Image: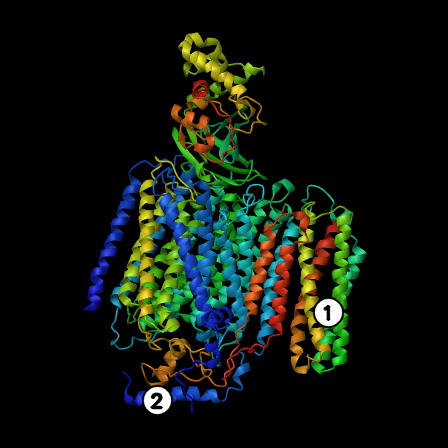
Amino acid sequence: MATTVLDPTHAHAAKRSVIVEWLTTVDHKKIGILYGASAFIFFLIGGLEALIIRTQLMKPDNTLVSPEMYNQLFTMHGTTMIFLAVMPLSAMFFNFFVPLLIGARDVAFPRLNAMSFWVFLLGGLFLNASFLMGAAPNGGWFGYAPLSSRQFAGGLNMDFWVIGLQILGIASLAAGVNFFTTIINMRTPGMTLMRMPMFVWMTLITQVLVLLSFPVITVALIMLMADRTFGSSFFSWAGGGDPMLWQHLFWVFGHPEVYILILPAFGIVSEILPVFSRKPLFGYSAMVFSGSFIAFLGFGVWSHHMFSTGMGPLADSFFSLATMLIAIPTGVKIFNWIGTIWGGSLQLKTPMWFALGFIAMFIMGGLSGVMHSVAPADLQQTDSYFVVAHFHYVLFGGSIFALTAGAYYWWPKMFGRMLDEKLGMTHFWLMLIGFNLTFFPMHFAGLLGMPRRIYTYPSGLGFELYNQMATAGAFLLGVAFLVFIVNVIKTWRGPADAPADPWNGATLEWAIPSPPQEFNFPALIPVHEKDALWQMKRDAGVSRLPEPELVSGKGIHMPGPSWWPLVVAVGILIFFIGFMMKDPWAFPFRPVNILGFAITTFGIFKWAYEAPDAHAPQH
Amino acid sequence: MPTPHNTEAAATMTTAVIDQHDTPAHEEHHTSLPIDNRKLAIWTFIGSECLFFASLISTFLVYRGQSLKGPGPKDIFSVPLVTFGTAVLLFSSFFVVMALNGAQEGNRKKLITWLSLTVLAGCFFIGMQVYEFSHFYHEGMGYTSNLFSASFYTLTGFHGTHVAIGTLWLATVLKDAIKGRVPKEKALNLELAALYWHFVDVVWIIIFPVVYLMSLGS
Amino acid sequence: MRLLRIARWRTLPLALMAVMLLVLVAGCTSGTHPQSTLAPKGDYAEMVDGLFMKTVYLATIVFVIVEGALLFAIFKFRGKPTDPAPEQSHGNTLVEIIWTVIPAVVLAIVAVPTVQTIFATAKVPTTSTDGQTPMKVEVIGHQWWWEFRYPELGITTANELHVPVGRTIDLRMKSFDVIHSFWIPQFAGKRDVFPNRETRLWFTAKATGAYPGACAEFCGLQHGRMDFYVMADTPEQFATWTANRMADTMLAATGLPKPAPKPDTAAANGAVPAAAAVVALPDTMDPALATQVAEGMQLFQTKGCIGCHTSSAMSPMKGMVGPNLSGIGSRSHIAAGWLPNTDENLKRWLHDPQAVKKGVGMIIPPLTDVEVNALVAYLRTKR
């Protein structure tokens, strides 16, 4: 007999103010929403930067923004979109859905999860605060030394970048440990690795990439910070240092980072296509192995970002061929997606359109990627707009399309409301056209000789047409996302009437109410197959399970809220801000660093001795 | 639309699922693998840390002999002192194994004795490094003197920071043990710290020959 | 019905995209694109272009097949919620093996010429097409201009690299400060230049003309304004240009030794060597202008220009932090290959270089219009 209580709100929670509730939450679903909301705001900021960039490049010799401002804009656009938009938007789905997809009640370390979020948010705000000081990072998202050294980049600009990225790295690493442990160890009984939903697989591989690549950039950033703050010469040739070391360390991180950005997208699309094709994912194990193979090869191809440095024919050949190899597992993925919809009964709803758009656009990005692997041709393409076109086809046409697909697909589960189909379709077509209008011409601009990261270009080189098209497309993309925002606002005002399983889903999250209750699953659901929910429906001989009822959750121990993750995050931020003060003689007596260190340590101790359910609601 | 029969079957199934919730005792500690979450997390973290130290050690090796001016390793290193420190750190791994053994047996005295020795060994190593660094500094090797000094201080400094964190962690467990808060069932609390401690130790076993012995050899 | 409606209004965006593609292709084939990688004018760039076009054709075939299959599947398999569930296929090992092998074969087709071209472009040819040994040129990237030195000729210039057609150019490149990247799309791919090591690149120009190039590695504030030109001359034009550089002995006036001018070639080109200009003024230009030129020459020394610049290509190669001004009067552009070299622009530059190109290293005291005019007149004699 289940105790069903329709209103699960407990008296204890009602006493806490809503703000305190969100500041201290350790619920993976709330943290997921926090990630999503902050990342979307950062995405809009990054988009605004892109629009200013596009307006500046609309015509030759434009003077809308100064070169200083332009360099800050493109640096922050790249840094924001990578670290503050696409990664945390993926993190939103990791947080909200990985526990649901594996049938768990939360992640392995809920408070660590909260800390990851707060560190990420404070790191993102810190990076953007640089604009308020008129000193946003201006050395490119890749921060090549010696341009990023104190000698060529005085001012606080690159300090914000070097320190901001270290802060964000802590968030990513903590989340990496947490989600790796969660996926390996918190699966519901019967969910073997090879029965996991594909999104969980791709999340797992992404975490491995984070765990193995972020330490490398952390070391590089520490050394760059030492150069800038304490005056060492790791990357300064004047002291015997080698700028190439920075490039190697950066790209040993940087290339896996590309897969950190795209693998979650692969996972989302691999969830959506089967559901809307009403048939299982084609070649499940091939998808798992190709994803793992991509990640593995991803660590062996970093130098294809450095063909123009003149590494010699042997190294060029090696990295050319290794890069080409990646096209094989990537091709397998694309073919398997087409295999999934082949012979299906396609339900062309908004999430499905975005997923299909993802495949179509990602093919383009993949093909131009293969062109880059051809080292001699890459010497013409690298650092030109051809590359800009390529990676936007991968990161926008790929990641953003898939993340948008995921938003439409999972919105009802997250908020209990269905997004509007008509507005969704408008969003999709505007985005598809706007996207191609923006980035397709960039291939041509690049091939016709337009270098990247130039704040303007002279007339007479024939770049005008392509830039005008790209600028028009960029504004169309802006409109597309306005439509999305309208959709969200409209939905917000409507009733929360989404059913538990609006799409006839295949995975466990659709078995529980929309939105899920705090404890997700009243009991762990044993799983015997891939596509567990489809299996359950088949076993029950139904096409839809009845709406699950809200239950009291009595007797379920959930971790209680905690202030300490936020305290630790603030401590970490203060600790790092201390490094913006450059007086080397203050070392090691740097009061701000010591204050931050003290707060962090204090927070960790209080955290360690706080019983996990100290403030848990009493059932 | 499901037929009435099917609805009934599904409802039964849903109820059955919810019913299980009445016996939640076993699921609280359910893990997919026979390993505690925290232990798995420490192992994962150690895997990540390997790349951290690999990057630092690579940098040190890449810049070996690239310094434009002195002092170099031969001018400055005092190998006997560091060898002694290395031995102490190595022994501390043995101490912590004994302490863990005591914790698992529920032998509080054994736990406290060996854990105290471990913490002392950690403190000794930190003290040795502080002495070594200040000695080098007075010999004229500052952090920014040359590539060697910067990569040396960064590598060994970060290792030292890890030793300090490990020592602090072990000392916290020791404090708990003295207060009687580390019973047999909570031996895992010490095991986690011990895992980390072994890792820090292993890293030093790589750093010691790479930094001290190889630098003198060439 | 609903699906049909979707199908109908879906044709609009598809049609739009097709039109866009046509516009692009049309745009690419017409108009002037002097910095294009698609119109190679040298052997290196031709090899790269040939390889690139192979990848384009293959990619187009793959693109059409895969996107075609995707679109076909979307149209063919759309269903209604009430349709019966489709066959629940989980995969097909044979098909999966086939579509793993096919891309591997396609990639092998690309890989072979890739490796061949990597090795073919890696080594500087020992003889150029005209039978001579390659001509060495040292390239030095500065924030934000390019310095070119011809060690075999002993001359130096900036932002305008003159090369004879048919002679292989052997570039040895370094940076004065941060990392830059040297790129002349119609001749060769990019090559980064570093402060702490030399990188190499080579090319042979096949047709005369002015070819724009640019810095391709982000190098700070004025990365967008770090362009240059390669002037591919006939061997005769190149000899003249070289002779003019050697004849330009502005430093003679300040007491440094004067290299032997070659009046015959200089005269043939209508060039007026600076020192000679002072002497021969009455014969070649009207007296008012001559006075102005003389004033300009004076100002060049008194206003501190000479602290950073020389206009003698023969001057000591080291110690000059500003671009060499040899031939500045006849360069097509100033301020590193983007600002047309008109009197107007030159005056703007001399009045306030920071207003024209912010952050540039040039410091100049405030000058009156008269002084600027005199300087321009003087610089115009450097041809």
Is any atom of residue C247 visible in this view? no
**Residue on which the image places disc 1:** B93
Given the image, on which type of amino acid does mark 1 rest? Ser
Which picture quadrant has residue C338?
top left
- Is residue C150 toward the left or the right of residue A503 in the image? right
Which quadrant of the figure has residue A568?
Answer: bottom right
> Mark 1 — on which chain does it sit?
B
In the displayed structure image, the side of residue A180 where residue B132 appears, left or right: right
Residue at x 53% of width, y 77% of height: A559
Residue found at the very far top of the displayed protein: C282
- Can you identify the residue that label 2 sits on? B9
**Percent from the top left, x then y, of residue C335?**
45, 31
Q: Is residue A273 above or below residue C268?
A: below
First in residue order: circle 2 vs circle 1: 2
Label 1 SS: helix
Specify whether A344 is left or right of C216.
Answer: left
- Looking at the figure, which quarter contains the N terminus of chain A? bottom left
